[in-house]
Amino acid sequence: MNWIATQSYYKIHRHVSSTEQTTVVQLRSMYLYEHKVRTKYREFAIEDVLDMSYRQMGDEGGFLYLHTKQGVFPYTVREDPSRFIDTFKVLK
C-alpha cells in the first residue's frame, strides 16, 4: 500500500549526565494512507483521527497536532504542514 502524503517531523532527545548534556535530533516522517496515519512508533486508523491542526511557533516551524480518539498527539515540524492537513481533510 502506497502513502498518499508525507510530512517530516523531528524528535529531540536530551541526555544530561554529571559532566555533560547531549542533544540528539532525530528526523522522522509521518505518512498518510487511505486507511491510516503512521509515524515511527504509532499508527492511527483514519476513522480514529478526528482532526489535524497546526500552530506556528516563531520562524522555526511549529507543532502539528493529531486530534484522535485516544487524545491529542503533538509533532514538532519545521515546514508548514498545510498540504498534509488539506490532503487528510479531503480524504476524511
Image (cartoon, rainbow, N blue to C red):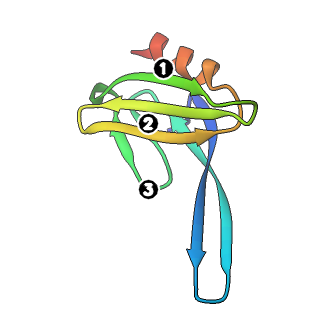
* Residue 85 image offset from top left, x and y in percent: 53, 20
Local SS, label 3: loop
Local SS, label 2: strand
Circle 3 sits on which residue? 41
Name the amino acid, label 2. Val
Front residue (pair 20, 64): 20
Marker disc for residue 37: 2
Marker disc for residue 79: none
Local SS, label 1: helix
Q: Which of marks 2 and 1 is nearer the N terminus?
A: 2
- Residue 29 placement, left or right of 40: right
Name the amino acid, label 3. Tyr
Q: Distance between the Cα atoms at labels 2 and 1?
A: 9 Å
Q: Distance between the Cα atoms at labels 2 and 3?
A: 11 Å
- How many neighbours does mark 2 have within 10 angstroms: few (below 14), some (14-19), or many (20 or more)? many
* Residue 52 image offset from top left, x and y in percent: 44, 23
Circle 1 sits on which residue? 88
